[in-house]
Every structure is written in structure tokens, then in C-alpha cells.
Amino acid sequence: LGDLNQSVQAFNKAIEAVTSNSPAELAEAWDQRGFILADLAGPLDDNKSMYEEAIKYFDRAVELDSQNKEAWINKGAVLDTSLNRSDEALAAYDKAIKLDGANAGDNESLSNAWSGKGTVLAKLGRYSESFGAFDKALELNPQNVASVWFSKGEALNESGRYDEAVKAYDKAIEQYPLDAMGAQAWYKNGLALKALGRQAEADASNVRAKEY
């Protein structure tokens, strides 16, 4: 409840009138509104309309400043994870990537775009392309890669490449030693090990997952 109240306060602050003649600053404000609204929608049951409204805010942001890659990335994330509109999400991530081009000024942001693209490609069954996208994300931001390794592990697992999936989950576990996502990584690691016929190791992974 405390987190929700903080989000509500942040949203109320974000929707205050922005006194600026700068399209870039106005775009940042609309992007922030969309991000916070999507965050508010998360815990709610009937939240599709809120996600749709958040998309409108991101669209407004890029209308004001087409170079605002964060708005494109946030739009891609909501379209993919919350609205299941994969083709549109892929287009949004591609737009963010194209904006940065080969000379990225913000590797963390660009890494997020590539990781999001990898997740969408895997959802569409385009696994080979997704692996390349995840590798690009890891290359761009090697210091903050736990979620990328986990997502790559998911794609490898889904495509039947269990041995590589185990290695990816192991990398995620190294980054998630005390995090709730660590439990998920251990659990999924166990599924991949079981598929490889390594039952004793799979059982050990499941035990570790329950420790969180």
C-alpha cells in the first residue's frame, strides 16, 4: 500500500502543468506520466484502460520529441508485457535502437531496448534473432545483466536448448543471490536440468528456489 501511495503522489506531481516552451522537456513530462500510470496499473485487476492511456502519453511524448528514446522503450515495454501487442512493441524498440544508432550515448538505455526486443522476438518464436538481441544487450551493459541473462535463459529453454539455458540461468543467479528473481532463476534452472535428464541437480535447484 505504501508503494502504491508513493506512486499516486508521483503521478499527481507528474500531471501538474509543466511551464516550459521546450518540446524536449514537455516530452519528458509526458513520458514520466505514462511510466507512472503504467506502474499504478500493475497491482489492479481491471487495468487495461490504464495501460492504453499510458500508451497515449508515450505517443504524446514522441510527438513532441521524436528523439525521446526512453518514451519509445517504455511504450515497447507496456505494449509487450501488459497489452500483448508484440508487433507494435517490436516496432517501438526498433525505433529506440535506431535513434541511438551505432554511436550510443547511453549504453544502459540502449541495452534495455535490445533486451526488450529480444523478449518480444522470443515471444514471436523468432528465437535465433532473440539470442542476438540479448547478446547485444549484454555487450552494451555488462555491469547490469541479470535480467538479460534470465530472459535469454527463458528463450533458450523455450526453444529446447536446455544446456545453454542452464548456463544462462547460472549467470542470472550470480547476479540475483538474494533477490526474488533468484528464486525464479533457480526454479527455471531446475526445469532445464530436468529436461536434460539431470534429475538430482534439478532437485537441488528446486530446493534452492524454495529458500527465497
Image (cartoon, grey):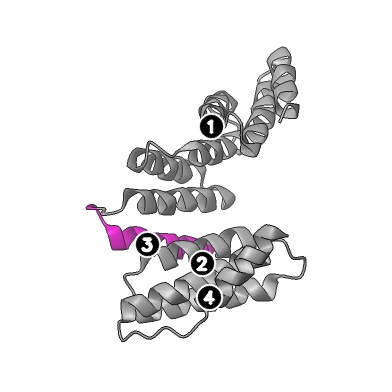
Quadrant assignment for the N terminus: bottom right
* Mark 2 or 1: the one toward you: 1
Q: Which residue is mark 2?
A: 88
Amino acid on which disc 2 is placed: Glu
User: Which residue: 65% across, 38% down?
Assistant: 180
Within the magenta stretch, is there residue 98? Answer: yes
Image coords of residue 36 (percent x, y): 56, 67
Q: Determine which quarter of the picture holds residue 98.
A: bottom left
Res. 56 visible in picture: yes
Disc 3 from disc 4: Cα separation: 27 Å
Q: Is residue 76 left or right of residue 82?
A: left
Up the image or down, 97 lies above or below 53; here it is above
Image coords of residue 72 (percent x, y): 43, 66
Element type where label 4 sits in the image: helix
Image coords of residue 11 (percent x, y): 57, 73
* Mark 3 or 1: the one toward you: 1
Q: Earlier in the sequence, mark 2 or mark 1?
A: 2
Q: Earlier in the sequence, mark 3 or mark 1?
A: 3
Disc 3 from disc 1: Cα separation: 25 Å
Amino acid on which disc 3 is placed: Ala
Q: Which residue is mark 3?
A: 96
Amino acid on which disc 4 is placed: Lys
Task: State the count of labels.
Answer: 4
Element type where label 1 sits in the image: helix
Q: Which residue is mark 1?
A: 172
* Mark 4 or 2: the one toward you: 4
Q: Point out which mark residue 41 bears.
A: none
Q: Which residue is mark 4?
A: 13
Q: What residue range appears in magenta? A: 87-103
Q: Earlier in the sequence, mark 3 or mark 2?
A: 2
